[in-house]
Amino acid sequence: MSLAAFFTSFLLLLLSEVADKTMLLILGLALQYRSRLQVFLGALSAHALMDLVAIVLGAFFGVSIPEAVLRPVIAVVFVLLGLWQLYKLYLRRGKPKKKTVPKAASPFLVTFMFVAFSELGDKSQIISGLLGAEYANTLVVFIGVLVGLVFAIGLNVFVASKVVEKMPRRLIKTLVAVLFIVFGIATYFF
């Protein structure tokens, strides 16, 4: 096992996910659903799949998903999600409708789909692809990435969600909406 490949992958992924837009999304989902374990597993599975694809592409072809193509789409989706949340909180008139979530929409599947979409062309996926191209041992790179993700997602879902849980719901929703808009704009321009 190449320790350099493992520790480089672990540290780069852990650091790239701190304060990342996907972590914000995962935190929001952890607050929405009671089953934090399903949110954790959905997020980890989606991340693992997306990063594995990037590592394999990086290792065998030396390419990654073109960021210039995905960046505007992802930016617009995040801004729209933030605006929609603000609209629901402050502008929608009438009696609030009771939320109904279809039984088929499990926390695992919802989290998996959201995280997989938000990771397309994300910096962690790009880093994974570059690490796959850099190191010959893709399995070690993947294990390092996976361990980094377990730490980042675990801290987010099981620790940060407990801290944020004590805050007023409306404040949390407003902050999440504003952060989505800020991350969308930042994704487009940076």
Image: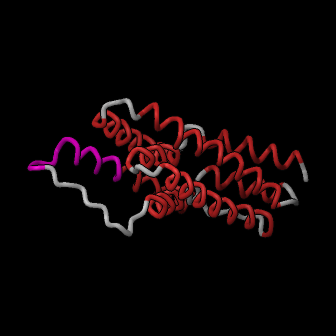
Residue 16, position as x, y percentages in the image: 64, 42
The answer to whether residue 127 is left or right of residue 171 is right
The answer to whether residue 164 is left or right of residue 159 is left
Q: Vertically, is 105 above or below 77?
A: below
Q: Please name the predominant secondary structure of the magenta segment in the image.
A: helix
Residue 26, position as x, y percentages in the image: 48, 48
Instruction: Say which residue appears at 38% left-offset and 69% top-offset.
Output: 104
Q: Vertically, is 43 above or below 180?
A: below
Q: Nearer the viewer, residue 190 or 61?
A: 61
Q: Is residue 27 visible?
A: yes
Task: Please state the extent of the stretch shown in magenta in the rendering.
Answer: 80-95
Choose top left, top right, bottom left or bottom right for residue 143.
bottom right
Whether residue 94 appears in magenta in the rendering, the answer is yes
Instruction: Say which residue appears at 65% left-offset and 47% top-offset.
Output: 150
Whether residue 102 appears in magenta in the rendering, the answer is no
Q: Vertically, is 164 above or below 187?
A: above
